Amino acid sequence: AQSVTQPDIHITVSEGASLELRCNYSYGATPYLFWYVQSPGQGLQLLLKYFSGDTLVQGIKGFEAEFKRSQSSFNLRKPSVHWSDAAEYFCAVGSWEYGNKLVFGAGTILRVKS
Amino acid sequence: NAGVMQNPRHLVRRRGQEARLRCSPMKGHSHVYWYRQLPEEGLKFMVYLQKENIIDESGMPKERFSAEFPKEGPSILRIQQVVRGDSAAYFCASSPPVSSGGETQYFGPGTRLLVL
């Protein structure tokens, strides 16, 4: 079965500090991967995506993520966090071999302290 | 270019009533997906539709839930005889044709359903 694990339910970082959110997946096919961000009461905004090629992908708002096939991971990073980054972050995987339906992790809530 | 539109944003129903949720995909998108987010959980896939066709409904509860995406108009997720356990946020996503980056799904703002 396909699954996505985000081990950290909550993370708190100081404004200006670096950030890494972890995502591990178990998937029977070659996946493509996404990170989405959700502010309270809002929809999901796409931060970045990986399909193939360069394993380090850049996204919006200064985020990046690195795909590591050997570790089945797709961790999200940002060198310097801003207070406006406080939100919930979801990692998701999909594949046309499984009909393009996304499998989501449970999410990581990011708190930013000033 | 407007994003994915969903309405209503909030819906309150009493047990036994029907809930009807609407989704208009982004312009040029022919694929629609519905997901459900229960409190403090991630999103769970429900159904995948193209115009006039259900492609994959493996995530839909077998009873009371149905979805359609007619030739004209928005996609509709219908929940009959709602129960308290149906209270959740329901998100619609759309994607372009496969040849145009169909892997990427863009999400609407969601409909928060509360069943009293």
Image (cartoon, coloured by chain):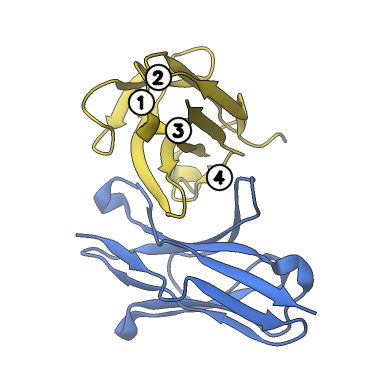
**Element type at mark 1:** loop
> Is residue B10 positioned above or below A16 on the image?
above
Q: Of B46 and B25, which appears nearest the observer?
A: B46
- Counting other residues with Cα less than 10 Å from the Cα at mark 1, is it few (<14), some (14-19), or many (20 or more)? some
Q: Chain of mark 3?
A: B
The chain painted blue is A
Q: How many marks?
A: 4
Q: Are marks 3 and 1 on the same chain?
A: yes
Residue A4, percent from left and from top: 34, 65
Chain B shade in the render: yellow
> Is residue B102 positioned above or below A37 on the image?
above
- Pointer 2 or 1: first along the chain: 2
Name the kind of residue labelled 2 in the image.
Arg
- Pointer 4 or 3: first along the chain: 3
Q: Which residue is mark 3?
A: B32
- Pointer 2 or 3: first along the chain: 2
**Element type at mark 4:** strand
Name the kind of residue labelled 1 in the image.
Val
In the rendered structure, the answer to whether residue B69 lies left or right of residue A21 reads: left
Q: Which residue is mark 4?
A: B106
- Residue B15, numbered label: 2
**Residue lying at the far front of the rendered structure:** B116
Q: Please tell me which residue is depicted at 42% across the width and 61% down the height of the picture.
A: A106
- Counting other residues with Cα less than 10 Å from the Cα at mark 3, is it few (<14), some (14-19), or many (20 or more)? many
**Element type at mark 3:** strand
Tell me which corner region of the image, top left, top right, bottom left or bottom right, holds residue B55.
top left
Q: CA distance from mark 4 to mark 3?
A: 10 Å
Q: Which residue is mark 1?
A: B83
